[in-house]
Amino acid sequence: MAEQVEISSFDLRYEGCRMKSAGSEKALLLSILEKGIVDPLYGINAKESRILLDGFKRYRCAKKLGIAIVPYCSLGSDEAFGIIELIRMANAKSLSILEQAKFIDELKSVHKMSVSEIAGLIDKSKGWVGMRVGIIGQMSPCVTNKIFSGQFPVYAYMYTLRPFIRMNGINKKEVDLFVSSVAGKNLSIRDIEILAHGYFKGTDELRSQIRNGNISWGLSRLKETFSDAGDCTEIERKMLRDLEVTQKYMQRLTFKCNDKRFKTNTFYAQANLLSGGIIRQLNPFTQAIRQFHDQTG
């Protein structure tokens, strides 16, 4: 049951565990102007304050609009178990995988909980928890800050940059330099992918231009290279287009499969049939692509 509390009573120590998004926050601000704050904020009741865990966008919007009283639900008085309860609620509250990872890292590093202990309390496998621990362990403070502040898209990191780094053995310092160079430039996922390939596998001149902020120049040069298929035969050009489209939709589906808005039985029935067909093709597809990649390398 939600209660009405003063906005000044909140402790924001976990704000860095939740991602910012200027676009969604702007839309939320307009919604609150029209309807008020509909969903309560969630936190932990400490001795002298309320430690906020969920509702930071609503909090910031309320501050901008001068709203002093907001709806609030308590997740208890124990900090660690409040975080556990929030993660358990993730299906409803839609925590992203990196937000889950950040909170799990807090449970491990601050509250000294083991992977198996966390897994048992949130009713997930040790592999599920361990994978999230691994994600945070791979990220430098610089990259973490750029993603959680909304300057670098989480999708670009998870499904473009992270696999690319893993396959090419790139060190964290170089990753930091690249992310710092392109963060906050409102680049598309595709543009970031093109720049990453150019930066990590291209010339020293190109790396230097990107580091110095000449993003448009670098992107233009790289797009010319990618689009230059003048020496290719018609069948080769068609194959390149097919590969590009396949990569695009694989990345899109990987991201969309985690969407919590899918609800209808009709959707589930059709999606199950289609996804089953894809699963049956995965092994031969993966084998063929691996062979093709080795052949063209």
Image (cartoon, grey):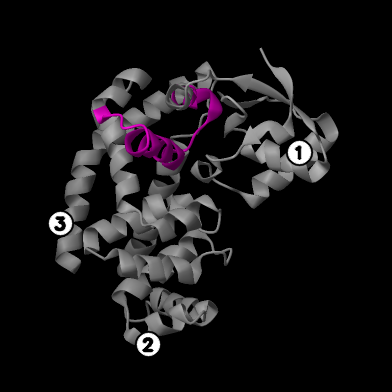
Is residue 114 on the magenta stretch? yes
Q: Nearer the viewer, mark 3 or mark 1?
A: 1
Q: Amino acid at mark 2?
A: Glu
Q: Specify whether residue 6 is in view.
A: yes
The amino acid marked with disc number 3 is Gln
Instruction: State the image quarter where residue 39 is shown.
Output: top right
Magenta residues span 86-115
Q: Quadrant of residue 294?
A: bottom left
Percent x, y of residue 232: 32, 76
Disc 3 target residue: 291
In space, the residues marked 2 and 3 are separated at their CA atoms by 32 Å
Q: Horizontally, is 237 left or right of 39 in the view?
A: left
Could you say where residue 91 lies in the image, as x and y percent from the top left? Answer: 49, 25
Tell me the number on the disc at residue 62. Answer: 1
Q: Tell me which numbered mark, 3 or 1, is placed earlier along the sequence.
A: 1
Q: Does the rendering let one see residue 245?
A: no
- Which mark lies nearer to you, 2 or 3? 2
Where does label 2 land, which residue? 205
Between 186 and 233, the one lying in front of the other is 186
Residue placed farthest to the top in the image?
1
Question: Residue at image x 32%, y 78%?
Answer: 202
Tell me, yes or no, whether the two marked residues, 1 and 2, touch with CB atoms within 8 Å. Answer: no
